[in-house]
Image (cartoon, grey):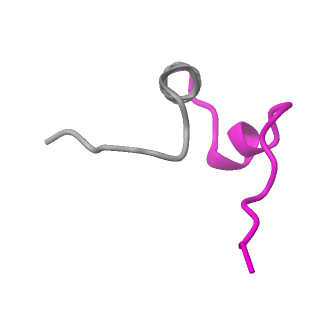
Amino acid sequence: MSRVYSRIREEGRRVIQIEVGNGATVRRIAAMPGRGAPRSHP
């Protein structure tokens, strides 16, 4: 079953998949440059 994501672009998904394959943790991926904590919109 394939998931559909709309908040990140295809390139970002590829980077995450590669990092997960390399054994990266969620925290490590989140700490990557250009990846900040999600912000809620008022």
Dominant secondary structure of the residues highlighted in magenta in the image = loop
- Quarter of the rendering occupied by the C terminus: bottom right
Identify the residue at horizontal 80%, vertical 33% (top origin): 32
Looking at the picture, tell me which residue is in the foreground, 18 or 22: 18
40 left or right of 36 in image: left
Q: Quadrant of residue 28?
A: top right
39 left or right of 10 in image: right
Looking at the picture, tell me which residue is in the foreground, 24 or 2: 2
Residue 20, given in percent of the width and then of the height, sits at 52, 30
Residue 18 vertical placement versus 6 (above, below):
above
Identify the residue at horizontal 72%, vertical 60% (top origin): 38
Magenta residues (range): 22-42
Q: Residue furthest right?
A: 33
30 left or right of 12 in image: right
Residue 30, given in percent of the width and then of the height, sits at 73, 45
Q: Decide whether residue 12 is among the magenta residues.
A: no
Identify the residue at horizontal 72%, vertical 73% (top origin): 41
Q: Residue furthest front?
A: 42
Q: Decide whether residue 25 is among the magenta residues.
A: yes
Residue 14, given in percent of the width and then of the height, sits at 50, 20
